[in-house]
Amino acid sequence: MLMISIRNQTKKYICNKTEKMKKGIPLSDEDRTPWLKVLQDVVKANLVGGKPVILGCSALLKQYREILRSADPNYRAGGYDRCVVKFVLLDVRVDLLMDRVQKRAAEGKHFMPVELLQSQIDLLQVDDSERIVKVDASFSPEAIVDNIKRSIF
């Protein structure tokens, strides 16, 4: 399994958007789409090269996930069962999620203020027809990874 690092390809983008979020301003579709297209290109290059990829990002809307799914050269809209790009939703109570983000921000491990979390929660769209794997994220990171492995592989 290949865990890709995309920092170099997205460094300029991330710096600009990180500053916006630090100021408490939620990202718009116009902010997110160029970044998703970069991720799409990276995933596609790896898939075409025969390399499996694990990518962590917030693809909150179906339209964002469609951009990433289209990295699969054989993907056709709505063909979720045949698409090699899979999505995992780390499903967790809002209060626990807020506590975790607050803790990470206090430790200097996260740039987004907890106040922006609600805008992301409000934006999240989950369509059961997409066959998104839902994993209980209230457990330890090790247990979450084990659950993901059992669900996908």
Image (cartoon, grey):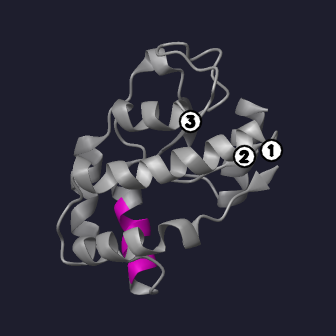
* Amino acid tagged 2: Asn
Of the numbered discs 2 and 1, the one sitting upstream in the chain is 2
**Residue 141 vertical placement versus 151 (above, below):** below
- Residue 99 forms part of the magenta stretch: yes
Circle 2 SS class:
helix
Residue 68 at x, y percent in the picture:
51, 38
Residue 137 visible in the displayed image: no
Circle 3 SS class:
loop
Check contact, mark 3 vs mark 2: CB within 8 A.
Answer: no
Count of all numbered marks drawn on residues in the image:
3
- Image quadrant holding the C terminus, namely top right
User: In front: mark 3 or mark 2?
Assistant: 2
| Horizontal relation, residue 30 to residue 45: left or right | left
Circle 1 SS class:
loop
Q: How far is disc 3 from disc 2 in space, using C-alphas?
A: 17 Å
**What residue is shown with label 2?**
46
User: Toward the viewer: 96 or 25?
Assistant: 25
